[in-house]
Image (cartoon, rainbow, N blue to C red):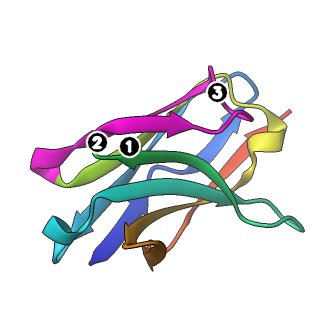
Amino acid sequence: VQLQASGGGLVQTGGSLRLSCAASGRTYSIHVMGWFRQAPGKEREVVATWTGGRPNIADTVKGRFAVSRDSAKNTLYLEMNGLKPEDTAVYYCAARQGTNWAFWGQGTLVTVSS
């Protein structure tokens, strides 16, 4: 499985971005996908997951972020609204195989200016 993330960029506080994660390869084996982020000097944290059609959003971004998936396009999206400087991070998409997050995209940088 290969994952290609895109959509990051520079945005002002309060702005919006939509990240995309296109999956290719043996995508039929993937039932759980997710978005993670890692800010400078911090550990990677989960932002949102998509499990068999059920979205789950981390409390830190709940109400501002939404996750969705287009099965026909094998693409996972992360809609980010009301962005804050603390959302600045490299965002990664990942796919789980069994209990392991086995596949990772290359990351896309989101920078929120104050």
- Mark 1 or mark 3, which has the lower sequence index? 3
Q: Pinpoint residue 49: horizontal percent, then vertical percent.
A: 47, 47
Quadrant housing residue 2 = bottom left
What is the distance, in whole Å, between disc 1 and disc 2 at their CAs? 6 Å
Q: Are the residues flagged by discs 3 and 2 in contact, CB closer than 8 Å?
A: no
User: Could you tell whether 100 is left or right of 27 in the image?
Assistant: right
Q: Pinpoint residue 96: horizontal percent, then vertical percent.
A: 40, 68
What amino acid does circle 2 point to? Answer: Arg
* Furthest residue in direction right, as rendered: 41
What is the distance, in whole Å, between disc 1 and disc 3 at their CAs? 15 Å
Say above or below: 67 vs 75: above
What is the distance, in whole Å, between disc 3 and disc 2 at their CAs? 17 Å
User: Could you tell whether 77 is left or right of 80 in the image?
Assistant: left
Q: Which residues are magenta?
A: 53-73
Q: In this figure, which residue is indicated by the disc labeled 2? A: 69
Q: In this figure, which residue is indicated by the disc labeled 3? A: 62
User: Could you tell whether 30 is left or right of 83 in the image?
Assistant: left
